Amino acid sequence: MKYPVVVHKSEHGYDVHCPILKGCHSQGDTVEEALENIKGAITTYLEMIAEETKGSIYKVVL
């Protein structure tokens, strides 16, 4: 699934967050690294939500 992300230049590199997943954010030294890191953050975020709600994650094609 594709999630929108927003990347901002910071003093230490690049910050990235996913606006539809509150609190899901990451960073990197380059834009490419930040985008790669947010993939892991999104996966972890969804796994934590599934665990907290005792639900399961399914991949659905729209």
Image (tube, helix red, strand yellow):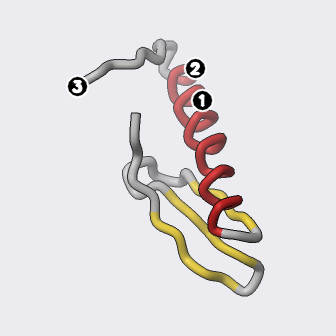
Secondary structure at badge 2 equals: helix
Q: What is the distance, in whole Å, between disc 2 and disc 3 at their CAs? A: 24 Å
Left or right of residue 6, residue 24 in this image: right
Which residue is nearer to you in this view: 40 or 33? Answer: 33
The part of the image, by quadrant, that contains residue 34 is bottom right
Which residue is nearer to you in this view: 4 or 49? Answer: 4
Residue to which mark 3 is pinned? 62
Amino acid type for the residue under numbered disc 1:
Met
Residue to which mark 1 is pinned? 48
Amino acid type for the residue under numbered disc 3:
Leu
Secondary structure at badge 3 equals: loop
For label 3, the crowd category at 10 Å Cα-Cα, with few meaning under 14, some 14 to 19 and many 20 or more, is: few
Which residue is nearer to you in this view: 7 or 56? Answer: 7
Label 1–label 2 contact, CB within 8 A: yes
Residue to which mark 2 is pinned? 51
Q: Earlier in the sequence, mark 2 or mark 3?
A: 2
Q: Earlier in the sequence, mark 3 or mark 1?
A: 1
For label 1, the crowd category at 10 Å Cα-Cα, with few meaning under 14, some 14 to 19 and many 20 or more, is: few
Looking at the rendered image, the quarter that the C terminus falls into is: top left
- Above or below, 53 relative to 30: above
Looking at the rendered image, the quarter that the N terminus falls into is: top left
Amino acid type for the residue under numbered disc 2:
Glu
Q: What is the distance, in whole Å, between disc 3 and disc 1 at their CAs? A: 23 Å
Q: Between label 3 and label 1, give the one nearer the viewer.
A: 3
- Above or below, 23 relative to 29: above
Q: Position of residue 55 (x, y in %)?
A: 46, 14
Left or right of residue 38, residue 17 in this image: left
- Above or below, 58 relative to 37: above
**Residue at x-position 51% and y-position 13%:** 54
